[in-house]
Image (cartoon, rainbow, N blue to C red):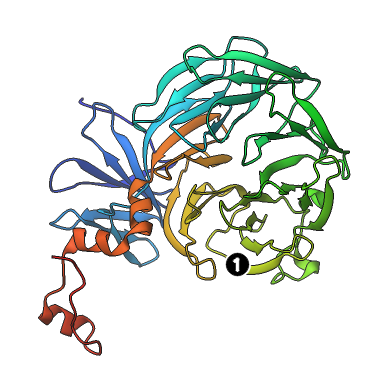
Amino acid sequence: MTARWTGHHASVYSLAYSPDGTTVASAGQDHAAVLWDVTPATPVRRTTFATTGSPGAVAFNPAGTQIAAGEDTGVTTLWNVHAPAEPRAVATIATGTAATAGHGRLMAVAGEPSLLYDLTDPARPRVVGRLPAGPADTAVAVSPDGSTVATASRKGAVSLWDVADVSRPRLLSTIPGRTGRLVFGPDGRTLAVNVGVGSGFELWTVADRRAPARLGVVTDPAGQGIATMAFGPDGRSLAVGGMYDVSALWDVGDPARPVRTSPIPPDPAVPPSTIGPPRQVAVAFSPGRRLVAAGERNGTILLWDTTDLARPALVTRITDQTGEILSIDFSPDGRMLAAGSHDRTLMVWDVSDVTAAQRLTSVTAYDNDFSRLAFGPDAGTLVTVNDRNTATVRDVSALRDAVRDPRGLACGLVGELIPTAWARMVPAVPFRHTCNS
């Protein structure tokens, strides 16, 4: 026996090798077709295609660029398996939560102890620093310039660490009696701290890392927990996501007196009488734009223009997902949006035109969910954390490049259409050269 591996949750009905022998496709009773890279000693899952029925047979085309999956519903589906934009899982890390820096290649992961990773090569994250052992950290945040890491411990204290020299982290200061979610403001001079398990939060100035000072306090208004917090690009607004009435927009221009300007409205397309259980909202601010993405319990993502914090205006609805949105994040350039849902699906969209979001890819993980996620600093990596506290580093550089230069990607894949092919495919449009060469 050369290798043995598991990946389906029910009987496997069919297997097929790709023509070049590097990939195996498997089809199972669990409504899934899975691609496996079998070049390593232990095969690695490349991607999973969710099917409506149980695929009883699977086969590659002669070029190895497509698979055909025949389902018990009588439907045969063709899948493109040579997609360069596929977000490949390239590394896994045991962790409780993760955060990346706005610049550089630093990723911090909370644990016992908390670790610092260099993501220069996403396939081989290197441990470059360890925070001195203490009470297990449950939350972590990295300042935008990557010089400071904030951790929240299980014992109820927030610590600020100087990581300018990642191999020798230095404790700068401690804020006692505080724990929960953490997020730095865009200038790195303000830290928002969720207090305990409730919906209250505090704003601290950390301009002097050795002497943080509390600026403002919001007492627990709803008695429910905060799920996510996100600063606006100007640092004067804060979006808070959570249960019940927690989800709201706050004006923090005067951090000593935070003002709740507006709730994050529910989906206007859903009648109030059918909304169902209390809303759980995941939120993210787009870098460089006053745009908030709010992920709803029903799987809908709403993009809100918050130019007027008191009157957020709905820009668009994204309805591709069906499970509760657990995590959401914009890429650092604001062109991509990623969301993980309770139905174990990760999706990424091109939101360059926010009025017409285009789905770029979908990944289904049958053995975990996507509880938290964060883009890397160059938009080429996406870190996801599942409900088993394992972080996966995904290479999304091809997605990033496709969004930045879709024509270049198309020309690189298939080259320029010749006039006869053009006339056959788009006869109503006069021929023109579309590639540089």
Q: Return the x and y of residue 185 as percentages of the image width and height.
A: 66, 39
Question: How many discs appear?
Answer: 1
Nearer to us in this view, 253 or 334: 253
Q: Position of residue 250 (x, y in %)?
A: 78, 50
* Residue 294 sits above or below residue 271 on the image: above
Write the residue at 65% across / 58% down.
298
Q: Judge from the rendering whether residue 269 lies leftward or rightward of residue 410; answer left or right.
A: right
User: What amino acid is labelled 1 in the image?
Assistant: Arg
Q: Secondary structure at mark 1?
A: strand
Q: Residue sitting at 68 percent across and 43 percent down?
A: 228
Report if residue 369 is visible in the image. no
Where 278 falls versus 183 (above or below)?
Answer: below
Residue at the limit of the structure toward the top, as seen here? 133
State whether residue 154 appears in this view.
yes
| Residue 80 falls left or right of residue 298 | left
Residue 194 picture location, percent across and down: 76, 34
Left-right relation of 49 to 213: left
* Residue at image point 25% right, 27% down: 3
Q: Nearer the viewer, residue 352 or 164?
A: 164
Which quarter of the figure is the C terminus placed in?
bottom left
Q: Quadrant of residue 291?
A: bottom right
Label 1 crowd (10 A; few <14 / some 14-19 / many >=20): many
Quadrant in which the N terminus appears: top left
Q: Which residue is mark 1?
A: 317
Residue that appears at 16% across and 85% down? 423
Residue 179 appears left or right of 217:
left
Identity of the residue furthest to the bottom in this view:
428
* Place of residue 115 in the rendered image (x, y in percent of width and height, measured from the top left): 52, 19
Nearer to us in this view, 433 or 319:
433
